[in-house]
Image (cartoon, rainbow, N blue to C red):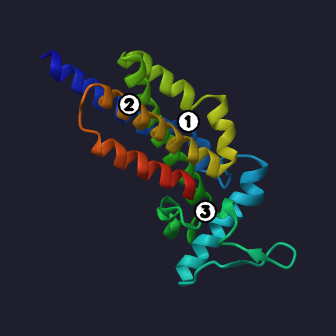
């Protein structure tokens, strides 16, 4: 009985983590406004829009022609051409580009909530404190402010995932446990951190 109530609480926490960013950013889902400020509208949204249009046309976005005489788009770190999660909402850019961009920010906020909860749970050991801490961290001033910098907002998730798995690897090595899955997760999260 006690074990099943803990599982129900965990399921509730994860469902809450999926729903709360949509409630938090509801204004941006129904308006043609971007989550973010100056950098979102001047740099990251145009880059995502250009990337989506290029991919939908079947082109590899090598050159950004809209600033000065242009520059290599694929080499610009902020374009994140090789980041695989940029392609989740690429088809939505054709119909509603603002919604597509905002869903990307909301998706990374959901990931941030889940990863920070798991990391806090490992560090603190208390589900309720970890639940509240992850909400305060993921929807607090710093994380919301950095949603203006789409790449940095996404990289926070992978940095936390790297730290979490590094802690797990150290803990499991001290207790002679298998670390293969943690090394794989650490490697993937570090790779995504670089690609973001």
Mark 2 residue element: helix
Relative to the observer, which residue lies in front, 194 or 58?
A: 194
Mark 1 residue element: helix
Q: Position of residue 149 (x, y in %)?
A: 68, 48
Residue 48 occupies quadrant? bottom right
Marks 1, 2: nearer the viewer:
2
CA separation in Å, label 1 and label 2? 36 Å
User: From where the camera sits, is residue 143 visible?
Assistant: yes
Q: Position of residue 171 (x, y in %)?
A: 34, 27
Q: Which residue is mark 1?
A: 24
Q: Residues within 10 Å of mark 3 (few under 14, many from 20)?
A: many
Quadrant showing the C terminus: bottom right
Q: Which residue is mark 2?
A: 170
CA separation in Å, label 1 and label 3? 26 Å
As drawn, 90 above or below 11:
below
Name the residue at 55% across, 24% down: 136
Name the residue at 50% across, 37% down: 160
Quadrant showing the N terminus: top left
Q: Residues within 10 Å of mark 2 (few under 14, many from 20)?
A: few
Report the side of 2 relative to 96 (left or right). left
As drawn, 156 above or below 77:
above
Q: Which residue is mark 3?
A: 80
Name the residue at 59% across, 50% down: 30
């Amino acid at each position: 009985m006690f074990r099943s109530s803990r599982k129900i609480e965990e399921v509730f926490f994860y469902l809450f983590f999926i729903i709360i960013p949509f409630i938090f950013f509801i204004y941006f889902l129904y308006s043609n406004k971007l989550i973010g400020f100056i950098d979102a509208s001047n740099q990251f949204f145009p880059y995502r829009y250009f990337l989506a249009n290029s991919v939908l046309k079947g082109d590899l976005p090598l050159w950004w022609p809209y600033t000065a005489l242009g520059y290599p788009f694929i080499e610009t770190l902020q374009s994140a051409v090789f980041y695989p999660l940029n392609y989740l909402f690429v088809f939505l850019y054709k119909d509603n580009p603002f919604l597509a961009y905002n869903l990307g920010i909301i998706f990374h906020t959901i990931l941030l909530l889940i990863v920070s909860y798991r990391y806090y749970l490992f560090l603190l050991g208390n589900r309720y404190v970890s639940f509240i801490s992850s909400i305060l961290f993921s929807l607090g001033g710093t994380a919301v402010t950095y949603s203006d910098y789409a790449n940095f907002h996404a990289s926070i998730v992978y940095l936390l995932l790297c730290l979490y798995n590094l802690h797990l690897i150290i803990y499991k090595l001290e207790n002679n446990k298998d670390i293969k899955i943690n090394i794989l997760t650490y490697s993937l999260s570090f790779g995504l951190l670089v690609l973001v």
